[in-house]
Amino acid sequence: MLSPLMQTQSLCPICLRVLEASIVEEDERAYMLKTCLEHGTFETVLWRGKTPMQEWIRTKERAYIKNPIKEVDQGCPYDCGLCSEHRQHTCTALIEVTSRCNLNCRFCFADAMEGKNKDPKLKQLRFQFESILKTSGRCNIQLSGGEPTVRDDLPQIVRMGVELGFPFIQVNTNGIRMANDEAYVKTLKEAGLNSIFLQFDGVDDAIYEYLRGKALFDIKCQAIENCRKFGIGVVLVPTIIPHVNVCSIGEIIRFGIDHSPTVRGVHFQPVSYFGRIPKAPKDEERITLPEVMEHICAQTEGMISLESMQPPGCENALCSFHGNYLIEESVLKPVSKRVCCSNGNEKAEEGATKAKAFVARNWSYQTQGKEEKLSDWDAILSAIANNAFSISGMAFQDAWNVNLERIKDCCIHVSTADGKLIPFCAYNITNNEGESLYRGSKRLG
C-alpha cells in the first residue's frame, strides 16, 4: 500500500496542463502520481535509496522576488519572467549565446545542432546582461548554448559581462575548441573567464561514442590541460544514464582528484527526458539523486560517505546534493557534514548568497603564489584553496516528474531575448511531442 508523503502540482506530459499530483512512498522509493482527464494517469519514480525523502527535505523561509518582471495571471509555470510568486533569487543566470553546436549528442536539453539559427548579436547580449542586473543584481553567469565556443567573439561576450560587474563567468562547453585552439583559451582567460563547465561523461571512449557520436576522451584531457596553462577552473559535468556510465562514477571522481587543482570538482546530472529525447521513460531508465550518492560512496570504496553529502541551502532540497572536501594525498577529506533535522529557520535568501559565493570561490582556478612570498597564514589559506574539491549533483525535471514546488524555488534562471528570466527546468521542459513551454515556442508565450 502506497503511503502519501505530500501533495503538489505537476504537468501533463502530453498537453502540459497543470495537474494535481501526489508524492507517495513504498519501501525505499517515492513516486509521483497524477491524472489528466484527457490523457490518463501517469506514475513516475522520483526517489530511490537508503535516504528517505522526508529526511532529506529542508524547510526554509522563502525569498520572494524583489523586482518581478511579471505578475501572476495563469499561475505557475505559465507566468515566468520571474513572477511575483517565485520564491528564490537568481544564483546563476544562464545566457544562451548560440543555438549552434559542433556535436550531435544523443542527449541534449537544447536540441542544438550546427547551423540551426543565427547567433544573437552583441547588442542583444548586452541587453540581456543589463536585464539580469536590473532583476537579480550581480549574480553568477553561465554562458551556454548550443556550444558557446563556436562563436569567435566569445571572449568579447565574457569581457562584456566582466565590465558590467558580474563577479563570476563560466562557459558551458564540450571542450572541443578548448582542446584544439590554445590561443582561444588564452584570449578567454584574458577576457576574464573564471571557469568552464566541461561535459565529461567518463574515461572510456565507448561512452563518448555512444552518447556524443565520437571518441572525445583525449580531447577532454587536452581541454583541461589548456585550462591549467592559463588558469581557468574546470568543473567536470557527467550526464549519468543507466546502463551507460553509472559504473564510471568513481572513475570520474578519481580523474578529477588527479587533475586538481585545475579540476575544482564534479557536478553529476542524472539524465532527464526533455529536449532531444522527450520520450516517456521507464523507471529503470532513470537514476535518482540518492542512487547517485550511493554509487559515489560504493565506487570510491567508502572514501566518500553519505553523511558528507547534504541538501542545498539555496534551491529546493529535492533538486540537488553537494559535498565539500579537501584533497590530502589523493584522498578526499570531508569538510561538510549533513545535519539530520532542519529547524525551519533557514532563510532562502541567505542560501542564495552563500551559494553564489561558494561557486565563485571554489569553481574558479586558485592561482598559486610563490611559497617564498607567502606568510605562514597565507600559505595555509593557499593550500586550503588549492586542495578544495566539491562533489555535487542536480536532478533536472522533465514533464513526467516535474514538481511545481521545485520550479518556484529554482535559483538557476535562463535569460530570454526579451529580458525575462525563466527557471531552468520550466524553460527546457518539453512534452511527448517535443513541444516546449518557453524554449523557441509560441505555445504559451
Image (cartoon, helix red, strand yellow):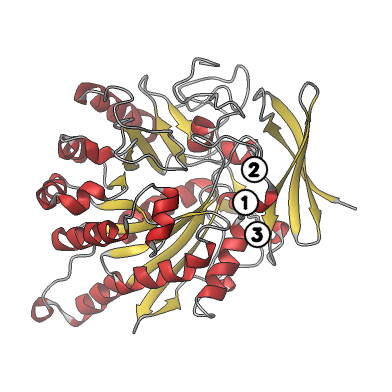
Task: Name the amino acid type tagged 1.
Answer: Arg
Dot 1 or dot 2: first in sequence order is 2
Instruction: Name the outermost residue toward the bottom.
Output: 329
Residue 250 screen position, x and y as percent = 47, 71
Q: Are marks 1 and 2 in contact (CB under 8 Å)?
A: yes
Could you say whether the residue bearing mark 3 is in a helix, strand or loop?
helix
Q: In the figure, is residue 16 to the left or right of 161? A: right
Q: CA distance from mark 1 to mark 2?
A: 7 Å
Between 192 and 377, which is closer to the camera in this rendering? 192
Q: Is residue 107 above or below residue 11?
A: below
Task: Name the amino acid type tagged 3.
Answer: Trp
Between 11 and 277, which is closer to the camera in this rendering? 277
Q: Nearer the viewer's eye, disc 1 or disc 3? A: 1
Q: CA distance from mark 2 to mark 3?
A: 25 Å
In the rendering, which numbered label is found on residue 286?
1
Could you say whether the residue bearing mark 1 is in a helix, strand or loop?
loop
Residue 347 screen position, x and y as percent = 54, 49
Instruction: Please report the residue visible at 50 percent of the width from the left and 56 percent of the height from the top.
Output: 393
Dot 2 or dot 3: first in sequence order is 3
Q: Which residue is mark 2?
A: 281
Dot 1 or dot 3: first in sequence order is 3
Task: Name the amino acid type tagged 2.
Answer: Pro
Q: Which residue is mark 3?
A: 56
